[in-house]
Amino acid sequence: MMTSVVRGYGSYVESQLLGLGQNTVVVMGTSEYTLTRNDLDYIRGLPEVDVAEPFYLTQAYIQTKEGRKQVYVYAIDYDILNKAIGNLKLEKGEYPSLTDVTSAVIGHFVAFSESTGAKLFDIGDAITILMPQVKSGGKVTFTRATVRVSGIFEEYGGAMFVSPDTGIFLPEKSGKSILHMNSWSGIFIIVKDPMLVDSLVKKLRSTYAGKVDIIAFQQIAKVVSSITGAIDFIAFSTSLSAFAVAVAGTAATMITSVIERTREIGVLKALGFTDSQVMWMIIAEAILMSLIGGLIGVTLGLGGAFVMASRGLSISSGVSKLVIKAPPKITPELISYTMGITIIVGIIGGLIPAYRAAKIPPAVALRYE
Amino acid sequence: MLRDDIILKAVNLKKAYRVGDVVTWGLRGVNLEVRRGEFISIMGPSGSGKTTLLNMIGILDKPTKGDIIIDGVRVSKLSSKEMAKLRNRKIGFVFQQFNLISRLTVYENIELPLVARGMKRHLRRRMVVDALKMAAGDLTWLKKKPNQLSGGQQQRVAIARALVNNPAIILADEPTGALDRSSAKAVLQTFVNVNKHGQTVIVVTHDPEVANCSNRILIIRDGIIVKEEEPCWDKCIINTVK
Ligand SMILES: Nc1ncnc2c1ncn2[C@@H]1O[C@H](COP(=O)(O)OP(=O)(O)OP(=O)(O)O)[C@@H](O)[C@H]1O
Ligand SMILES: [Mg+2]
């Protein structure tokens, strides 16, 4: 079942590659470098770049019926958002016009409670956003902004970098006027072809020399893929030794059971059961035994897989933290594969005891006390 | 006709048991002819080879020398699969300790030889019921587990199991050894009935009142049949126990 969790993450990453990220690169400003119009023009001028749009991003709190809730507020061009995140759909309402700086599209779990599913905000509602600001001396003050809900996104699930479900998305212009941010947080870049990501990243690295953060989702995905690949291998080798243990366990149990029932086997043979009938009876019993064991194992394993997966896999680098929550990938194939293995365990584990039992001469078996 | 009349023949049957370097002779050369429909009892001291002989006859073990012919079939020529088939069709076993399978119901125990034979489920029922009736059993036992029955009742179930396939020969090794007198009487009554029905019965016993119910008493000593005695029907347990 380890396998199902790992494959869950693996396929999550794959789906992200297809959805968000395959050809997305984000350049983030830092405390020592502020991105400006010049940077945007330079990036737009690079041959690899299809589209590049600046955005503002801040962490904030909103007040809901269920208390204070943490959200991410983005001021970003809706077109590039849609290009970057595939399958992001409005479940209600519409995108505000580019100049409507106080209107927002909100994520599913801003509009609805994550725990109860209760509706917190609807189209037309006003949301007050509290943006913490650390002043000198460590004092935190909040800047307030009020926006109106014009659209609600469908539930998206985990996504890299952008978390649509807990985001509030405003037009790019809102960054300055509503969020009172004086510089862009970063620039969202869509590359013409996924093949060009590496060359673009190389160019940007040499231009900015570590002054900005460059996030290429394709590269993150590669790392996660290799991690899940490694875990998959570990899981495989674990399964292999578990397989050996299971075979040995089945064999030991069956040998005990066969010895205990030597006399019974003698009786069956006296009544005319053939060696192969006796052998198959014992193998069938071993298979049944390992199937029961397998069923218990699968049930516990499934439970474990869901618990592990619900806690998620978190990858953090610097300020950005990525939590991957992916449902374990439990396919009918995986279950039938597990059951197939179980049956093989039963056959292999039962074979030797069954053969031994079948070969005992009945007269000897009947003398057994 | 005369040849066909011999259901069982043993020719110079020898059996050596080897435990380490020690060789014990269970049988030292037994010759025996049993006609179809006979009721034979075998008596002898402990360790004289009675069980060994019965095991050879029942093809539960292979003789060291000699041969057995059952209903015209030379056993030494058979594969282990053919031996199993012969045991299944021609021979019914009854043991001192009943040897019923405790996990199975009475019904399931009795039908085992039919299962081994590969008979269809719906055909088995009637045969199981007939066999239990023949063994003077009670049909209410069918759903019970063996341990819910008395020793005498369990032995009658075991006899029903031995009879269910309608075998030519019933072999019983001290079938009354674990029973009280009245249960022993019921068991012998069953054997006598079965024998009247045409089946050949061979019983190993220490009990003269059991041996006296048969047609012929064979005395075995040190692995050899030393003499034959005339039974006395009046001293059969059926007549001595009220
Ligand atoms: N499996 C065996 N291994 C070694 N020796 C054996 C084996 N079976 C029987 N014997 C020996 O062969 C001889 C005949 O044994 P058998 O069991 O046939 O006697 P029996 O007449 O049935 O005795 P009892 O009346 O006690 O049942 C005995 O000396 C016994 O110890
Ligand atoms: Mg004996």
Image: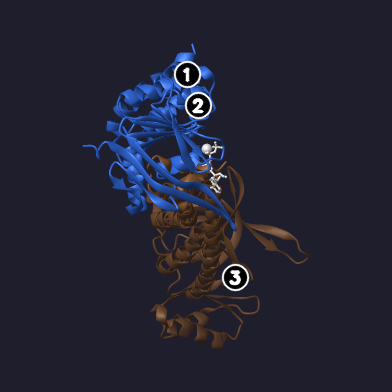
Chain colours: A brown, B blue
- Position of residue A289 measured from the top left corner of the image (x, y, whole percent): 49, 47
From what the image shows, is residue B219 above or below residue B152?
Answer: below
Crowdedness of circle 2 by 10 Å Cα count: few (<14), some, many (20+)? many
Can residue A127 be seen here? The reply is no
Disc number at residue A182? 3
Q: Amino acid at mark 2?
A: Thr
Q: Amino acid at mark 3?
A: Asn
- Cα separation between marks 2 and 1: 11 Å
**Whether marks 3 and 1 lie on the same chain:** no
Residue designated by label 2:
B176
Q: Secondary structure at mark 2?
A: loop
- Cα separation between marks 3 and 2: 106 Å
Crowdedness of circle 1 by 10 Å Cα count: few (<14), some, many (20+)? many
Outermost residue toward the top in this view:
B242
Residue designated by label 1:
B237
- Out of A297 and A302, give the one closest to the viewer: A297
From what the image shows, is residue B72 above or below residue A40?
Answer: above
Q: Which residue is painted at 29% across and 46% down in the image?
A: B73
Dot 2 or dot 1: first in sequence order is 2
